[in-house]
Image (cartoon, grey):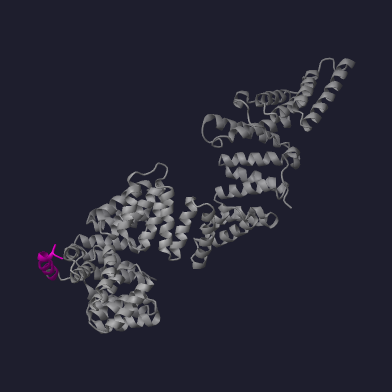
Amino acid sequence: MIHLIVSVALGAVQPAALAQPFDLLQHASQPSNQAPAKPSGAGSAKAADAIAEAYYQFMTGRRLAMEGDGDGAIKALRLAMALDPASSQIASELAEVYARQGQMKEAVELADAALKLDGDNWDAHRLLGMLYADLAGRGEAGRTGTVNASAWQHAVDHLERALGDTQPDMTAGIRLTLGRMYFQHQDYDKAIGTLKRLLADGPGLPQGIALLAETYAAAGKQSEAIALLKDAVEEEPSFYSALAEAYDNQQRFAEAASAYEKASEQNPRDADLKIKRAAALLNLPETASAAQARALLLDVTKTDPNASWPLYLLARALRLLGDLDGSEGAARRILIINPGSTSGAHALAQVFESRRQYTKIVETLEPFVAKPQKGREADTALLLTHLGLAYLELGRGEDAAGAFDRAIQLSPGDDALKAYRAQALVLARKYDLAITLVRGLRTVRPGDLGLARLEADALRGQGNFDAGVAVLRPLMDAPGAGPTGVQALSDFYASDHRYADAAALMKPAQERFPKDLNVQFQYGVMLERLKRFEEAERIFRQVIAADANHAGALNYLGYTLLERGQRVPEALDLIQRAVKLDPYNGSYLDSLGWVHFKLNQLDLAEASLRTAAEQLVRDSVVQNHFGDVLAAKGSFAEAVEAWRRSLSGDGEGIDRARIERKIRDAQPRVGKE
């Protein structure tokens, strides 16, 4: 069994709180090696009687101290010291009693006096080491300020002297305290060495195990911490919590969740263990894990409905399980409890991201990042990142670049933020800045396909399409390159309406990677854009035959059939299947709304297309479709707004002259609907 450290057996001091402030450092001892003075007349009978009486009073004082009579012990020991003033042992014993009484000034003075009589007095070194360790531990563990640093040094000096050659059963408390001193001063090697010696002398000491595990973790030696704690839990299950945290630190979330579960079995009412277990479960990919986390968090929030962190985790669990309404409710509860909560704002923004409601993300986050909270810079950087991504989706390149720039200032080492900023600069048509930024990132990650595509897009924006191709082609042709390189180059050609070149790349690619359905699908898309509809349909049906839940192929085939005026009921079924798989996808909702429009189901058409138009603000086709539905319902003012958004959007797939004509025809009817 694991043994507890007993302070009496180890001689450890547990002083009472100081009744009045006392600067121990004013009495920092400078131990000498001076030998104890011999009492004058030591050979006389009178001197012998005095020594005998001193010994009697010394033993009486020690007995009274053990019985809890501190005042009586002090009286007896004072008398003993008067009878034998050269005794270092009496002085150190009296110092111990004063320390236990909370009279620290007297304790330090007497311990210093004992060391002046005998510089090797073990009790005095141990006592002073413990007292100074207590003082050092009251602040930032000796790391801030001269006083605490000095206390730390005095503690270490005395404790190291106290170790000496004493027996292990007398030094366990000293080693434990000394190990803590080293740990507090971030001298992890010395702390580990000291604590390993402690556990070698006395295996199973729980305080030693806990501190050594913490030291291993702080030193980045997570594997050693886990090995230590795995052995410890075999005899003492109370270490399951520490073991779980060690697994957490190594991102071994399945093992962490299991260890937290065992810790909860020992402490079933400990809400913190349930919360930590839920957090570990939420880092696992399985839906069942999210369901377990939800059950734990519902239990915790039922007991404490105003605790923000469990609500944040609950919002995450519900979102992962597809319950976006429930997730939004949990996020809004956080903001009701604390309107300034960045975690509540983040949870709510994540719900809106799942629904692709980018305007709502902007409305939610802009107030939170307007006045960053001091000490919450990391939270603000996270919110700025989400805000910047929402701006990107809304086509607000300048705003996105500004958000990412602010996030970079708060988190300058995050290269992902710099890549996002480059993407925003491309959208804002600041191509020179984007190229400079991306090329700097590519010096570190030359094979990063995403960065290469950003550089190619910026070059295309400058009118140098071929230079963009030259950036992407080496990554496609690199030895061992997979399908992503050719897909990126093909998509780059398509972005410049060079569909024949894009299809020419994808044809051999789909033969080279016959089992990659995304390659097959992309080839079909390029064929459709070339109006090679029968070939495209064949490819889409092959993809769906291989994967009935390939939402992209379902939607694309359905929309292709619809645009050709063929098999409209089948088109509706295909598109509905795609929407069921991804209910918040604006492209799929556009297809669904358009097929309802073709079937003259105008209310259903408007519902789907309104959501799609709010999401895909810059998609000219979506805005055009929405305008047509609104006009059919007689909402001409709103229809004109949608058509104007179509004209100012990406310009893809629309007949500008026709839309301008629709606007002119609708103008006289605005205000008369």
The picture places residue 350, in percent across and down from the top left corner, at 39, 58
Left or right: where does residue 220 sit relative to residue 547? right
Report how many numbered discs are placed on residues in the image. 0
Q: In percent of the image, x 26 and y 69: which residue is there?
A: 606
**Residue 340 seen in this snapshot:** yes
Left or right: where does residue 139 sit relative to residue 430? right
Of 226 and 7, nearer the camera is 7
The picture places residue 248, in percent across and down from the top left corner, at 54, 56
Which range is magenta?
658-673
Reply above or below: 522 against 267.
below
Reply above or below: 195 against 420.
above
Q: Of all residues shown, which one is farthest toward the front?
A: 672
The picture places residue 270, in percent across and down from the top left corner, at 59, 52
Q: In percent of the image, x 81 and y 30: which residue is there?
A: 63
Query: Where is residue 659, by image quadrant?
Result: bottom left
Reply above or below: 182 against 65.
below
